[in-house]
Image (cartoon, helix red, strand yellow):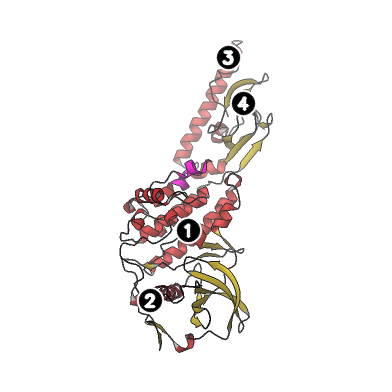
């Protein structure tokens, strides 16, 4: 073995490989490392190599951390974790390890690239698929006793063809309070202890309260970070905003995070927000106790018929007319509309953001009992009958009761209109009655 300041490398790894030629193009950088493009001349492919930054290449602690990162990542053989090819020592650039060259964008770039108000349900669905793949990587690492400790959108790479990688395992450690263990790291390298007890390690804007306090961490600490990642997907911002460091540290210690809808300023799926906030609970016992448990909640949400299309109507346009068949209900996102009825088009009421209409015809499977017209620019969320059937179990007992109530409501309304007509009274109901 070639011994170099306590770092043991096999002889065939002690020199820069003749098959790997550094092109000199930097493709990434982190707190301690620089990632450059490397050409594998034997296999005719471009890969990546991570080096220590210039000026710290002789720092023994950081050199050991780089070796530890290479060996840990190499042992996490998973589709959503970048494979490591080789650990070596370049003549000019020092210690390095080579790995798969990942092409794509960070999740941060994707989230910042489109205004939240313009996001479609299809885009949110794709983002949640990325999130589930990150969860797969973390769950696998936990099964091997490894904690990532720095899960965030900057460390998630997304390729054009469905590739998702959780990057940068440089501050990962073994669960159970130990920095590392020779059994998990293999026989080649006695795993070093790289951080002092009580030291806060990670990114402050995503850090769990126990992390900043320097307490013992575990899988629920990574689950907190996954909650932060989901929060960022929902709002495009990390759980803790940028502010002066002392104020930010106090907020992190207390675990003060506003609800995603409050931060985003736009309607968000409540069930998804609840999942994020549970993972972000200040008390670790209130969080999901495994990554798989959190994944199951996300998958259940995706099966729940949450994808509501957005419909836009200019002022004066008609959403639907009295007598039309009714297979959709609507929730008002922005703007307002009038509910009209009868040949006279009498205004029964005006509705605004947060109100719903059209549900009676959906539940009762009847035609519309009124006309709805946009007053100003109207934006609606359209909820189909299929969504109600999925969420309420319309084919089962609860659905049968809902349908029965809706039909009786329609029957009573028709009976009331006939009675008023026979008396010569207006057939229009009082303006405070709801129609759909």
Q: Is residue 319 magenta?
A: no
Q: CA distance from mark 1 to mark 4?
A: 45 Å
**10 Å crowding of disc 2: few (<14), some (14-19), many (20+):** some
> Hey, which quadrant is residue 107 in on the image?
bottom right
Q: CA distance from mark 2 to mark 1?
A: 25 Å
Q: CA distance from mark 4 to mark 2?
A: 68 Å
State the extent of the magenta-drawn residues as a range: 255-273
**10 Å crowding of disc 3: few (<14), some (14-19), many (20+):** some
Q: Secondary structure at mark 2?
A: helix
Mark 2 or mark 1, which has the lower sequence index?
A: 1
Circle 3 residue = 420
Mark 3 or mark 4, which has the lower sequence index?
A: 4
**10 Å crowding of disc 1: few (<14), some (14-19), many (20+):** many
Mark number for residue 152? Answer: 1
Q: CA distance from mark 3 to mark 4?
A: 23 Å
Q: Is residue 272 magenta?
A: yes
Q: Badges 3 and 4: C-beta atoms under 8 Å apart?
A: no
Q: Position of residue 23 (x, y in %)?
A: 61, 77
Mark 1 or mark 4, which has the lower sequence index?
A: 1
Q: CA distance from mark 3 to mark 1?
A: 64 Å
Circle 4 residue = 338
Residue sticking out furthest to the front: 55
Q: Secondary structure at mark 4?
A: strand
Q: Secondary structure at mark 3?
A: helix
Mark number for residue 143? Answer: none
Q: Position of residue 177 (x, y in %)?
A: 31, 65
Q: Position of residue 379 (x, y in %)?
A: 61, 36
Residue 65 versus residue 403 in the image, above or below: below
**Viewer-side residue, 229 vs 299:** 229
């Amino acid at each position: 073995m070639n011994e170099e300041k306590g770092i043991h490398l096999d002889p065939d790894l002690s020199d820069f490989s003749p098959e790997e030629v550094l092109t000199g193009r930097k493709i990434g950088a982190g707190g301690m490392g620089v990632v450059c493009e490397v050409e594998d001349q034997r296999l005719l492919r471009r890969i990546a190599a991570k080096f220590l930054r210039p000026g710290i290449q002789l720092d023994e602690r950081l050199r050991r951390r780089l070796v530890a990162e290479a060996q840990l990542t190499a042992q996490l053989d998973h589709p959503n974790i970048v494979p490591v090819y080789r650990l070596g020592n370049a003549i000019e650039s020092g210690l390095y390890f080579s790995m798969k060259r990942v092409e794509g964008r960070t999740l941060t770039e994707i989230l910042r690239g489109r205004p939240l108000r313009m996001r479609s349900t299809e885009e949110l669905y794709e983002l949640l698929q990325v999130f589930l793949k990150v969860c797969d990587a973390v769950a696998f690492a936990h099964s091997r006793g490894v904690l990532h400790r720095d899960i965030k959108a900057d460390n998630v790479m997304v390729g054009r063809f469905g590739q998702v990688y959780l990057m940068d395992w440089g501050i990962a450690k073994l669960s159970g309070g130990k920095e590392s263990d020779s059994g998990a790291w293999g026989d080649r390298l006695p795993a070093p202890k790289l951080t002092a007890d009580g030291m806060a390690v990670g990114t402050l804007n995503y850090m769990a309260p126990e992390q900043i306090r320097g307490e013992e961490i575990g899988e629920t600490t990574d689950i907190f970070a996954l909650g932060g990642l989901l929060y960022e997907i929902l709002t495009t911002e990390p759980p803790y905003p940028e502010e002066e460091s002392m104020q930010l540290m106090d907020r992190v210690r207390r675990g003060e995070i506003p609800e995603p809808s409050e931060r985003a300023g736009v309607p968000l799926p409540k069930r998804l927000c609840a999942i994020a906030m549970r993972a972000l609970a200040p008390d670790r016992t209130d969080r999901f106790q495994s990554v798989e448990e959190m994944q199951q909640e996300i998958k259940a949400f995706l099966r729940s018929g949450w994808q509501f299309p957005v419909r836009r109507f200019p002022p004066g346009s008609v959403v639907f007319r009295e007598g039309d068949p009714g297979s959709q209900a609507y929730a008002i996102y922005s703007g307002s509309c009038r509910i009209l009825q009868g040949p006279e088009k009498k205004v029964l009421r005006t509705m605004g953001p947060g109100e719903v209409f059209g549900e009676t015809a959906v539940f009762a499977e009847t035609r519309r009992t009124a006309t709805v017209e946009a007053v100003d620019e109207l934006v609606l969320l359209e909820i189909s009958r299929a969504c109600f059937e999925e969420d309420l179990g319309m084919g089962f007992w609860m659905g049968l009761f809902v349908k029965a109530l809706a039909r009786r409501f329609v029957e009573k309304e028709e009976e009331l209109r006939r009675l008023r007509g026979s008396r010569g009274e207006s057939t229009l109901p009082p303006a405070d009655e709801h129609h759909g």
